[in-house]
Each structure stands twice: as structure tokens, then as C-alpha cells.
Image: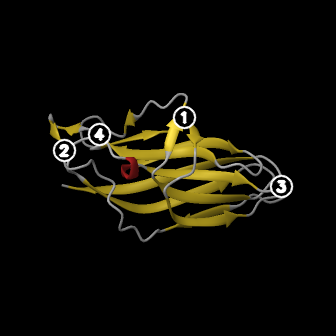
Amino acid sequence: FSSIGTATAASGEATHILSVQPKLTFNSITNRVKFTLENLNILVTGTSPIRWDLCLGTTLTGTTTFIDANTTYSGFQYNILGTLSGTPAITIASGYVASSGQTKGETNMSVPFKYPITLDAAGVARVNGRLTLLVTGIGGASACRAVMNWKEIR
């Protein structure tokens, strides 16, 4: 499965571009599907480089509607809207993508991922059960796109 997000990375400020979390139910039962992140791809179309951070334990405010990745076949949802509120609990991985007026940057990486993106034991969403990608413009705001690809183990 995959989800795609677009955002303008604010200069010096972490900007939400994409989040993934488990649905509460899958096929009408409590969702216990396991999540494995396959890869992450980031393309900077703006003129300033960015820093990216893959995080757990984020709080989003504003328009935070999560959309089913696939209503029939996926146990996960994604969100491309909303604003980061506060500081993430855990940063799993981070890096930089270069960009300038003449050259646009891209990164495609596999992230070793051993963190449980799951509901809690009672079947309720938990703070560290959401995976969020943040982007920060360096020296200016910069437009960017991101894709998260994952597989689900049932």
C-alpha cells in the first residue's frame, strides 16, 4: 500500500506532510494488522533544501481527517492535512534533501523499522501508534512531495 502527501516545508519550522495510523476496525473486528514500512521517497520541487523527520507520537490539529488507504483491503489510514502541535515523542529517522533554483533533490530510502504502529490492547488509538513524516525548509520555504510504501501482515 502507499500514500502520497504534498506540502510546503516552512522555513525553520517542522511541517506535517503525511501520517499513517491503523483503523480501529478491519472487516468489522478490532484491527490487529501489523505494519511494515517498505520505503520512503521525498522529492523537493522548491528551491531550498529540506530536512525530513520520520516520527512517532505526534499530535495534529486543524483538519485531521484520516482517509482509508484502501477501504476493502487495508487496515490503515493516512492524513495529508493537519498541523503539527507540539514535539513528536520519538524521531525514528531523519535526513536532508538538497535543492536549489537550478537543481531539484530527491531521496528514496528503506528505513529499518521495528516500531509497532498498532492500537493499544483495548483496541483504542494510542499516542505512539501514528507514523508521521515532517519536513522543514532550510534557508527558505520549499515545496515537496512524499510517498510512504508499506505492507500489512495479517
What colour-coding does the image apply? secondary structure
Looking at the image, is 38 positioned above or below residue 20?
A: below
Instruction: Find numbered disc 3 in the image and state the secondary structure of the residue it sits on.
Output: loop
> Which label number is shown at residue 81?
1
The residue pinned by badge 3 equals 139
* Earlier residue among tags 3 and 4: 4
Badge 4: few (under 14), some or many (20 or more) residues near its Cα, within 10 Å? many
* Earlier residue among tags 1 and 3: 1
Tags 1 and 4 touching, CB below 8 Å: no
The residue pinned by badge 2 equals 122
Label 1, label 4: how far apart the Cα atoms are: 17 Å
Name the kind of residue labelled 2 in the image.
Answer: Ala
Name the kind of residue labelled 1 in the image.
Answer: Leu
The residue pinned by badge 4 equals 23
Label 3, label 2: how far apart the Cα atoms are: 45 Å
Label 1, label 3: how far apart the Cα atoms are: 24 Å
Task: Decide if residue 150 is on the left or right side of residue 47.
Answer: left
